Amino acid sequence: MTSTQNSERERSKTGAGRLRHVFVHDLEIVASVGILEHEKRYEQRIILSADLAVRDDYDGVSDRLAEVLDYGKVVDDIIRLVQAEHVNLIETLAERIATQCLADQRVERVRVRIAKPDILPSGGCVGIEIERGRSEG
């Protein structure tokens, strides 16, 4: 067996190279965000989703929260960040959330989507989505 094949066997035993997606979809948060005067004066709803591609080292047996990325902590951290202060642009907010998620060394990539559901009179949503990875420093 070649050294490359040995390395691949070792990675498959330990889970290295595998990814697990941890996601939060359609989290509704009341936030102070926007550039218009009424947006600075009054908080508004945003709908947030995050998909985190996490290095999957979980053995599938231990059944312990400490062995995986805790999505409850991800949600709490996002809410705390969103409600910390006024942000003019949802683009800025998305970047901050992505940076926060990537601070956990197990997270390889993150996709963040933020929608403002109460902006259009017709009832539709407007928003943005970004994707960031660890190597994009």
Image: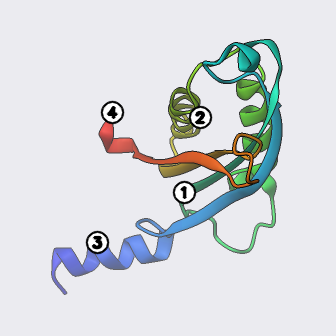
Report the residue that reaches farthest toward the left: 2
N-terminal of the two: label 4 or label 2?
2
Residue at image x 55%, y 25%? 89
- Distance from disc 1 to disc 4, alpha carbons, whole Å, reads 17 Å
Mark 3 neighbour class, 10 Å CA radius: few under 14, some 14 to 19, many 20 or more: few
N-terminal of the two: label 4 or label 3?
3
Question: Disc 1 vs disc 4: Cβ atoms closer than 8 Å?
Answer: no
Quadrant of the image containing the N terminus: bottom left
- Distance from disc 4 to disc 2, alpha carbons, whole Å, reads 14 Å
Q: Which residue is mark 3?
A: 7
Q: Nearer the viewer, residue 25 or 87?
A: 87
Q: Nearer the viewer, residue 80 or 4?
A: 80
The three-letter code of the residue at mark 1 reads Val
Rendering coords of residue 99 (x, y %): 51, 32
Nearest-to-viewer mark from 1 and 4: 4
Question: Disc 1 vs disc 2: Cβ atoms closer than 8 Å?
Answer: no
- Distance from disc 3 to disc 2, alpha carbons, whole Å, reads 34 Å
Report the residue that reaches farthest toward the front: 121
Say whether residue 71 is left or right of residue 102. right
The three-letter code of the residue at mark 4 reads Gly
Above or below: residue 49 compared with residue 92: below
Rendering coords of residue 120 (x, y %): 69, 45
Numbered mark located on residue 97 in the image: 2
Mark 4 neighbour class, 10 Å CA radius: few under 14, some 14 to 19, many 20 or more: few
Q: Nearer the viewer, residue 87 or 58?
A: 87
N-terminal of the two: label 3 or label 2?
3
Q: Which residue is mark 4?
A: 137
Give the secondary structure at mark 1. Answer: strand
Give the secondary structure at mark 3. Answer: helix
Report the residue that reaches farthest toward the bottom: 1
Numbered mark located on residue 89 in the image: none
- Distance from disc 3 to disc 1, alpha carbons, whole Å, reads 21 Å
